Amino acid sequence: MSIALKIDMPEGAFSALRMDPDGLAKELRLAAAVKWFEIGIISQEKAAEIAGLSRAEFIFCLSRFNVSPFQYTIDEIREELKRGI
């Protein structure tokens, strides 16, 4: 099930971004999903669902936004390495 969401955009946004309304809607979904994943609000799986992509496609798209597919800090990685995980 999905719910339609209406967003008012200035007409100039489409020409500035060189996208039609459908392309911009897809890009907004992806950008929101990437940001929410980056700040730890949602998982990769949920982000992929929001973006309308498979998880593999979403992980690939993260590089466009310079976002790591790993949600660990350096300290968390070090701690796991110390514990042998």
Image: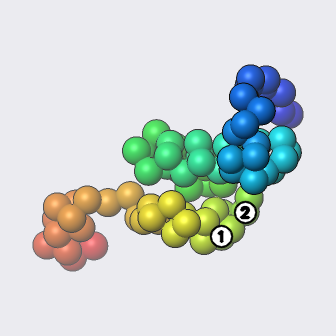
Image position, residue 79 (x, y; %): 16, 65
Residue 11 point in image, percent of width and height: 77, 32
Callout 2 amino acid: Ser
Q: Is residue 31 above or below residue 67?
A: above
- Mark 1 belongs to which amino acid? Ala
Q: Quadrant of residue 13?
A: top right
Q: Is residue 52 left or right of residue 22?
A: left
Q: Is residue 52 visible?
A: no
Q: Nearer the viewer, residue 72 or 7?
A: 7
* Residue closest to the eye, 34 or 44: 34
Q: Residue at x 83, y 33 (%)?
A: 2
What crowding class fits label 1: few (fewer than 14 Cα within 10 Å), some (14-19), or many (20 or more)? few
Q: What residue sits 68% from the left and 47% below the top? A: 16
Name the residue beneath numbered marker 1. 56
Q: Are marks 2 and 1 in contact (CB under 8 Å)?
A: yes
Q: Which residue is mark 2?
A: 54
How far separated are the C-alphas under marks 2 and 1?
5 Å
Residue 54: x, y in percent? 72, 63
- Establish if 19 lies above or below 84: above
